[in-house]
Image: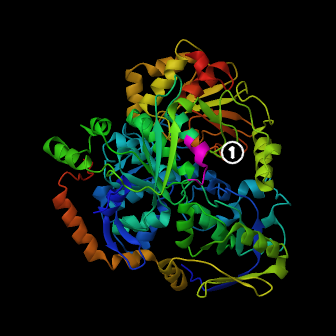
Amino acid sequence: MDKFTVLTAIAAPLPEANIDTDKIIPARFLKTTKRSGLGVHAFDGMRYNPDGSEKPDFVLNREPYRKAGILITHDNLGCGSSREHAPWALLDFGIRCVIAPSFADIFFNNCFKNGILPIRLPREICDALMDDARLGANGRLTVDLERQVVVRPDGEEIAFEIDPLRKHLLLEGLDDIGQTLQHEGAISTFEAARGQAQPWQTRIVID
Amino acid sequence: MAARTLFDKIWDSHVVERLEDGTAILYIDRHLVHEVTSPQAFEGLRISGRRLRRPDATIAVVDHNVPTSDRTLPIEEPESRNQIETLERNVREFGVPYFPLLSERQGIVHVVGPEQGISLPGMTIVCGDSHTSTHGAMGALAFGIGTSEVEHVMATQTLLQKPAMNMKVVVEGTLGAGVTAKDVMLAIIGTIGTAGGTGYVIEFAGSTIRGLDMAGRMTICNMSIEAGARAGLVAPDETTFDYVRGRPFAPQGEAFEQAVAYWKTLAADAGAHYDKIVELRAEDIPPVLTWGTSPETVIPVSGTVPDPSAESDEAKRAQMQRMLDYMGLEAGQKIAGVPVDVVFIGSCTNSRIEDLRSAAGIVAGRHVAPGVRAMVVPGSGIVKAQAEHEGLDRVFLDAGFEWREAGCSMCLGMNPDRLTPGQRCASTSNRNFEGRQGPGGRTHLLSPAMAAAAAVTGHLTDVRELI
């Protein structure tokens, strides 16, 4: 996983609420056994006509937003399916940071696992950042994870909250499985104690 | 110790270690695996040289991609075939128990788990699928995870989690004729909204919930995620224990009795704190359905399509108008009487034997309306066999329904069962998002009985007119 430290990028405004993960990546594109290559299908229904041509009005089809690294939306981004293909598709498109007033829980988690920083900010701030984003290449935002601020084009800094553990993993680009396996002893002890206290715990074995 | 909720008790009993910032290493009892969200996780294990820690706590099935037609024929779509074959290679390599396509025990992962006694009260259960919340009906903490977390569970049998907040949804009273668990859950989602449960685990309680059979409780918990909650649960009681008793992977004999004694301690303590409580009266819930492209767009079947001009928030107004345009509906239009092209009875929400009995009760002696494609897709091979044993297949086939093999089918448009653009579907599934059942498809979520009513009349219909 790539580290996330400081990102300066074009931000794409997508002022819609409840953008579900079926919208981010429809199920028919989930047949891959890889994590890469989904960017071309990101937002398929919003981005392409049925004949495959681009919808010219959709923000990610317009310059300079084709190169957006940040996406700003309204409430409840990523609701619905748990598919991690949603952050994979965003990442493959080039999005490293998503900003919204609120996120669906599973999508929020999935972003961190892929080096995407999800930032919760109040609706009116998201709207102000969307106004910045509408300036296109002149409206680049900087996201500084170490300092926990979003820097607007005029230099104003907006602070955001992030869980310390998640911040650490993102800054270092760490895989949390390795982290957890350092607690292997505790897991084994727990497992053994549980097996003794609850002898009815069954094992799944198919002959 | 302070009074605890059902969620608190299950959570506490699974914490391996608390990290400094409040994150817990949470032990996972059951990991359910399917073909769509697992290949990258198995690949991750292989690349890092890690083993799958507890194959005996893991079960794999194929469900999302599988065709629901003749199983003896090869799978035509090469990508679907590849994903299924990849799972089969992975379960062999890592020694994971697996119900293959031709096994009677194959089916939708959220139907199979409880049916086999793999999902039990008091457990933590995860799967790379948001509808894992279904298993909460057993009185388990069950939630969906992404593929990175699938790999994390495979490697460590744990997850890094922060505790959720507690919400209680209380439904009291007696349901009216033609009103089912699906109507109750849609009414709840219509009340709290699709983000109402974000950050919470919802415990469903009250006399109405207690009175539901396990299939009904599974329908309720299944759609918790449609209210934004990762998990929903119902305290285990005699209904639960009767359901679990004798299932293949459930504890048997003396072990079962010991387990029941423990499961009885899981219900919330008197005075346990809930961060939010929502109350509904069963008598206030009519048969309902959705009109738009979000599961919260719930209206009574006797109602009319809402008017965006009555909405003051500009963004919401635009969104409502977009939904109306997509759905091909007009503001103020009566929802009953809108013609349907397809009726889908199935999915992890409503494909259990009880659901099929409910639909068959409406269909018996009637016929599918001309021009309507109606299909029944049982949730597992075992549900299918049980239905055939009861003669339900004849009821559906004689009425002109298709009687298909088990799988996710038309719930999500990733197998051959899909809507074509503009087609309108009365569906017992869980999501009505744009394109969910196929690009351009229009979905109305409703109960199996209401779906059956739509099939025989050819339009959205108040099921109470047919009972």
Q: What residue type is disc 1 on? A: Thr
Residue A37, how many percent across, how many down? 64, 66
Q: Residue at x 46, y 28 (%)?
A: B174
Q: Is residue B245 left or right of residue B127?
A: left
Q: Does residue A62 belong to the magenta stretch?
A: no
Against A182, residue B304 (above or below) is above
Q: Residue furthest left?
A: B254
Q: Residue at x 49, y 19 (%)?
A: B361
Q: Which residues are drawn in magenta? A: B188-196
Q: Residue at x 28, y 56 (%)?
A: B56
Number of marks drawn: 1
Is residue B415 something one can see in this rendering? no
Q: Is residue B371 left or right of residue A50?
A: left
Residue B320, how many percent across, how many down? 76, 46
Q: Residue furthest front?
A: B271
Is residue B142 or residue B235 the one in the foreground?
B235
Quadrant for residue B95, please give it: bottom left
Against B366, residue B284 (above or below) is below
Q: Residue at x 58, y 62 (%)?
A: A85
Residue A7, how many percent across, how many down? 67, 83
Is residue A65 or residue A100 the one in the foreground?
A100
Give the residue pinned by disc 1. B293
